[in-house]
Amino acid sequence: MRDADCVAFLRWALPRLGFRWQGFRRVRRQVCRRIESRCAELGLPDVGAYRQRLMEDAAEWERLAPLCRVTISRFFRDRELFRGLERDVLPELAARFAAGRGAEISVWSAGCGAGEEPYSLAIMGRLSPSLLGVRLRIVGTDLDATQLDRAHRAVYPESSLRDLPVAWRQAAFAPAGEGEWQLESSYRESVETTLQDLRLRAPAGPFHLVLCRNLAFTYFAEPLQREVVERIRGRLLRGGALVIGGHERLPALLPDLAPWRRSVWRAVA
Ligand SMILES: C[S@@+](CC[C@H](N)C(=O)[O-])C[C@H]1O[C@@H](n2cnc3c(N)ncnc32)[C@H](O)[C@@H]1O
């Protein structure tokens, strides 16, 4: 399939699924490959014929939506951000909310992938000297059952671990054959995962910290982004923090979310 044909198709189809084309620009190749395979499966000659098929068969949109799901992730994706969480954000949240109750910090990883993000926090919570006495209770949600199955197995290729500090990697992972590593079960215990669509619902909460990175604020169309940020805001405790992706921005400046540091917002009301 020619890139230009796929781009024209995506520009037409993505908004109809509630997505924004701009978010897919850099990762379009994998989505185009999947669409090409779907065309072949249906015996269609090109993406133009697939567009026609979508116009005639509403059920095909249900098949297209998962083909547009981007699942790239890795441990400690955006090292500088994780360093900031470790040294500033989490210690401050613990100090602020600990009074009389022990420092248990509740965290929601929205679009948790195969566990890379919530497990990064679990590892940090256990091994960082800055977080001694702090207990993280982490909920991860994702729309994709395959991703959550992978999170339960917790087996990862070498490339997923490349940003993880070496000492932490040695402490938390055991070899699992052929260039793969499994997270030790004790690190998995603080993470609970749930199959859930962020466009429709959120876990009960409330949360001290919510991470919503490389999902809604990259791929969703703006009206949907606004719904999502309101939903997340509804689950954040006053004084809690929302973390977004390094290349993302919030859809609108909400009066009760104030900038804290790069990619981190604080709920101020
Ligand atoms: C690109 S990955 C990002 C993972 C992680 N947050 C990170 O930054 O590395 C996006 C994840 O969001 C999930 N996802 C996509 N649409 C979703 C939705 N509507 N609700 C919940 N999760 C969704 C995908 O299955 C995928 O695991």
Image (cartoon, helix red, strand yellow):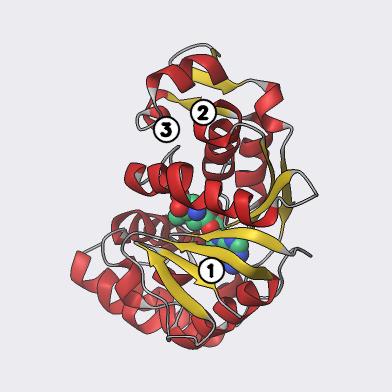
Identify the image quadrant of residue 123: top right
Neighbour tally class for label 1: few under 14, some 14-19, many 20 plus, Cα within 10 Å: some
Towards the viewer: 225 or 244: 244
Measured as percent of width and height from the top left, residue 173 is found at 54, 18
Q: Callout 1: helix, strand or loop?
A: helix
Q: Please name which of the two marks, 3 or 2, marks the residue nearer to the observer.
A: 2
Neighbour tally class for label 3: few under 14, some 14-19, many 20 plus, Cα within 10 Å: some
Q: CA distance from mark 3 to mark 2?
A: 24 Å
Q: Is residue 266 visible?
A: yes
Question: Residue 129, which numbered label?
Answer: 2
Residue position for label 3: 160
Residue position for label 1: 65
Measured as percent of width and height from the top left, residue 4 is found at 19, 71
Looking at the image, residue 99 lies above or below residue 64: above
Identify the image quadrant of residue 221: bottom left
Instruction: Name the residue rendered at 54%, 52% in the picture.
Output: 92
Q: Callout 3: helix, strand or loop?
A: helix
Q: Mark 1 belongs to which amino acid?
A: Ala
Q: Is mark 3 within 8 Å of ligand 1?
A: no
